[in-house]
Image (cartoon, rainbow, N blue to C red):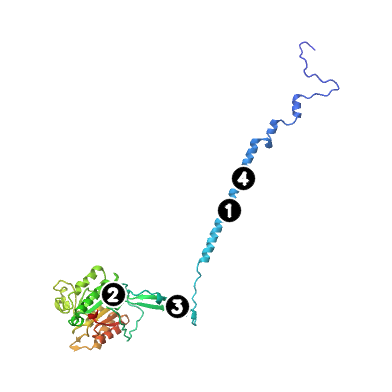
């Protein structure tokens, strides 16, 4: 070995001996190190933790999806159940089958229902304010003119119930707008009052007071939609208004003032027109509508006393639908110097009504007799105008 040469730290092996591996080679042959193992998923704690979180999230998503699906199905099931219940709970349609025979079961049921109505019906009130409405327009339905007189005794100021049961059902009917106990005022009502000099004698002071009170009560009870007027008559006639007008409060209040001069207590014996003519106001300043015979169509040239024919035709000219006529006697009407009979007077009145309304559209005329006087002609008028006749005793009212 040269002096300047470094010794060989790895001398070649001796002949026949095995070679000794180096340190690097030894480490490679010894297997994977801890660092190598850390690179594997099963030996990396961080990777294992991430996988656990992913699995947890996946499980939560599955549970959430299942929950949503459950809620949706539950809501659909509830909606379907509600629809089914609603359909089942609806009442089945009713069918009416018309047959030629008579079902005794139906007849018995109808009889029982009628008895129930009569049993449960309330007691009639002392006075009713319900208004019977009637059309003022001509109707296409012809109402026959019969000869049957309706003569039903009714007490003053009363109203009654009527029972009805037919194919359309059952019900109670109330009459209203009554005068002297006769119900049915109609849409356009006119009170026609005899104020001749015989009325105070036949009625007595208490009877006249009762008549005044009944006129006030009748008008006060009218609903606002009803039209009304008052015509007082003797040899001529006076009107409260030119024609029926709506029953407002201020117009109702004029009734007492208008009526207070009649029956011999005012500055005229019978009517204002007879004493004051066409002036339109009496000496006390009370207004009236003058109705002399010459201004009523069809009655020109007529004269006489207790002119119910004059008052009725004047009411027809005002297109009344219902008239209440109260008098204590038959008229003494003359035309062209000839005294007309009761039959001729009624015919004259009916002819004028037919001219104004048409035969099948005559108004209803109810007739009230004082102490039964004039019964014959009043029943004839009530008959021809589909009204009622009634006799009263004012002194007993």
Marked residue nearer the N-terminal end (2 or 4): 4
- Percent across and percent down for residue 287 are 18, 72
Disc with the residue nearer the chain's start (3 vs 2): 3
Q: Which residue is mark 1?
A: 70
- Distance from Cα at disc 4 to Cα at disc 3: 75 Å
Disc number lying in front (4 or 3): 3
Mark closest to the chain's N terminus, 3 or 1: 1
Left or right of 143, for residue 219? left
In the rendered image, residue 83, in percent from the top left (x then y), is placed at 53, 62
Q: Distance between the Cα atoms at labels 3 and 1?
A: 57 Å
The residue lying toward the viewer, choosing from 15 and 229, is 229
Residue under pointer 3? 112
Nearer to us: label 2 or label 4 = 4
Q: Which numbered tag is attached to residue 58?
A: 4
Tag nearer the camera, 3 or 2: 3
Residue 52 position by quadrant = top right
Which residue is painted at 56% across and 54% down in the image?
72
Please name the residue that numbered disc 2 is placed on.
Answer: 188
Q: Secondary structure at mark 3?
A: helix
Tags 3 and 2 touching, CB below 8 Å:
no
Relative to 390, say whether 49 is above or below.
above
- Image quadrant of residue 31? top right
Q: Is residue 312 visible?
A: no
Give the number of marks: 4
Question: How far is disc 1 from disc 4 in space, using C-alphas?
Answer: 18 Å
Residue projecting furthest to the top: 3
Which is nearer the N-term, disc 2 or disc 1?
1
In space, the residues marked 2 and 1 are separated at their CA atoms by 73 Å
Residues under numbered marks 4 and 3 in contact, where contact means CB atoms less than 8 Å apart: no
């Amino acid at each position: 070995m040269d002096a300047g040469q470094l010794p060989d730290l790895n001398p070649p092996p001796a002949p026949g001996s095995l070679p000794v591996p180096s340190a690097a080679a030894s480490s490679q042959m010894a297997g994977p190190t801890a660092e190598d193992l850390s690179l594997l998923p099963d030996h990396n704690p961080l990777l294992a933790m991430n996988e656990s979180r992913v699995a947890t999230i996946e499980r939560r998503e599955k549970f959430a999806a299942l929950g949503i699906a459950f809620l949706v199905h539950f809501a659909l099931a509830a909606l379907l159940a509600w629809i089914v219940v609603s359909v089942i709970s609806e009442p089945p349609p009713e069918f009416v089958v018309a047959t030629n025979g008579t079902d005794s079961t139906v007849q018995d049921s109808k009889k029982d229902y009628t008895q129930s109505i009569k049993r449960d019906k309330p007691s009639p009130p002392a006075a009713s304010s319900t208004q019977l409405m009637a059309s003022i327009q001509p109707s296409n339905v012809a109402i026959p003119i019969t000869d049957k007189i309706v003569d039903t005794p009714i007490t003053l100021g009363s109203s009654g119930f009527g029972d009805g049961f037919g194919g359309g059902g059952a019900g109670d009917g109330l009459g209203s707008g009554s005068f002297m106990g006769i119900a049915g005022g109609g849409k356009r009502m006119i009170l026609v009052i005899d104020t001749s000099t015989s009325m105070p004698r036949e009625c007595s002071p208490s009877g006249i007071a009762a008549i005044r009170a009944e006129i006030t009560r009748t008008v006060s009870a009218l609903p606002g939609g009803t039209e009304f007027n008052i015509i007082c008559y003797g040899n001529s006639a006076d009107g409260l208004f030119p024609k029926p007008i709506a029953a407002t409060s201020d117009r109702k209040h004029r009734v007492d003032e208008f009526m207070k001069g009649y029956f011999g207590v005012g500055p005229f014996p019978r009517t204002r027109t007879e004493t004051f003519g066409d002036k339109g106001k009496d000496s006390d300043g009370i207004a009236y509508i003058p109705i002399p015979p010459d201004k009523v169509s069809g009655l020109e040239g007529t004269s006489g006393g207790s002119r119910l024919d004059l008052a009725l035709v004047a009411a027809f000219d005002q297109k009344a639908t219902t008239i209440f006529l109260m008098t204590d006697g038959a008229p003494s009407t003359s035309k062209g110097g000839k005294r007309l009979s009761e039959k001729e007077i009624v015919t004259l009145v009916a002819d004028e009504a037919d001219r104004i309304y048409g035969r099948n559209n005559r108004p209803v005329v109810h007739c009230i007799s004082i102490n039964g006087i004039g019964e014959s002609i009043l029943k004839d008028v009530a008959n021809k105008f589909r009204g009622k006749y009634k006799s009263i005793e004012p002194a007993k009212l």
